[in-house]
Structures are given as C-alpha cells and as structure tokens.
Amino acid sequence: MNIKYFFSIRILGLALLGVSLLFSCQRPSDKPGAITVRQLQDMSEMATVEFVVSRIIRASDTPSWYKYGDRKILMSAGATIKAGIDMGGITDNDINTQGSSITLTLPPASLISLNMHPESIQQEYESRGFFRSPFTNEERYRFLRQAEEEIRESIPEMGLLETAESHAVLFFESWLRLMGYEQVEVRIRK
C-alpha cells in the first residue's frame, strides 16, 4: 500500500482564550498573583496545536494460482491530530517564583488525540477483474487502520510536538505577564 499525506495547521485559539479568561478574571493588583500547582494541574490536557491530515490509500491485490484477475482500490481519508501539554505532570519543583519573576517548567508535549473522520472517508476508485469479488468492509477497515498507524509514525516528521511546545511556551509567557510577573521564563522539561 502506498500512502501519501498532506496536512494543514490550525491553532486551538478558543482553548487558549478560554484558559486565559479563566485565570485572568482575577482582580488586578500591584503584586503578581500566586500561581499554584493545583491551578495548572486543573487545566488537565491543554491542546495547543491541531493538524488536519489527509491520506490517500492505494492498494492492489494481485492474482495468484487460485485467483484470476486483480483488484485495485483508491481511498481518501481525513484525520485530526491534537497535541499539547499534559498539565497533570506539573510538580511543585516546576514553579519557581521570586518577587515579580517566575520560572515555569512544562512537561514535554504529547499526542492528545488522533481521530479519523468517518464522513471524510471516500472511495475514489475501485477496479477488479471479472472473476474477483469486491473489497470487503474488513479489508477496507484494515487499510484505514494501516493508514492511521502510518499517520502516528509520521508525527515526528510533521513537527507537531515541537509546534505544540512552542505554542505552549508563548501562551504561558503571555499569560504570566498578564498575571503581573515582569520576568518570565517558560521552558520545556527534557
């Protein structure tokens, strides 16, 4: 099976906006607000990037001694991949404050979800010899599972996790400045 992919990026702006509104609804003061580990852990999984990937699935079934004729199929499928930071992994050691400066260490980005959309699965082409039966639903499902596995394997090539980490750093730098901190350092735990 030969599979090609194309992808586009969408930032989860609404999620980031919602989290910033949640924490910025506090009364402004001269001192920076105290950030607690519990507040950050309550964010749970924070998706910071979403990729939409399209896969082209091409498969052929060549004849053998007991099969006469060949079968070919071409399908397309779309998937949404979300990645971000698991905020449950933050500990007391990850937040260091001194006056108006703060250092926040975030866990590395991870895959949050990979969803193949049933409505996006299309059979583009099918060809079969006269004596051959059409592809079964089990065979089609196997092709889709293989495509999903190939998408998972190609995540490092897409730069998805690096993008999720850079978006998380930018978000928390901005958010901590809004909270009143003047010197902000946000880094990713290795």
Image (cartoon, helix red, strand yellow):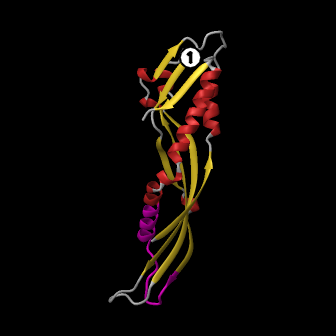
> Residue 99 at what x, y percent from top left?
55, 11
Residue at position x 41%, y 21% from top? 93
Q: In the picture, residue 27 is in which quadrant?
A: top right
Above or below, comparing residue 19 to residue 116 in the picture:
above
Quarter of the picture holding the C terminus:
top left
Q: For the point 65% across and 10% down, which residue is it?
A: 29
Q: Quadrant of the N terminus?
A: bottom left
- Report the span colored magenta: 127-147
Residue lying farthest to the top in this orientation? 30
Q: Is residue 131 left or right of residue 98?
A: left
Query: Is 72 on the left or on the right of 18, as rendered?
Result: left
Which residue is at a point 63% across and 47% down the rendered structure image?
10
Q: Secondary structure at mark 1?
A: strand
Q: Position of residue 57 (x, y in %)?
A: 51, 69
Query: Three-letter amino acid code at disc 1?
Result: Ser
113 is higher (above) or lower (below) than 45:
below
On screen, 27 above or below 18?
above
Considering depth in this image, is 141 or 48 the residue closer to the camera? 48
Taking the magenta stretch, the answer to whether it contains residue 140 is yes
Residue 184 drawn at (x, y percent):
58, 23
Q: Residue at x 44, y 67 (%)?
A: 143
Report whether 170 appears left or right of 68: right
Where is residue 126 shown, x and y percent of the image? Answer: 53, 78
Residue 44 falls inside the magenta stretch: no
The relative height of residue 26 versus residue 149 in the rendered view (above or below) is above
Q: Which residue is mark 1?
A: 101
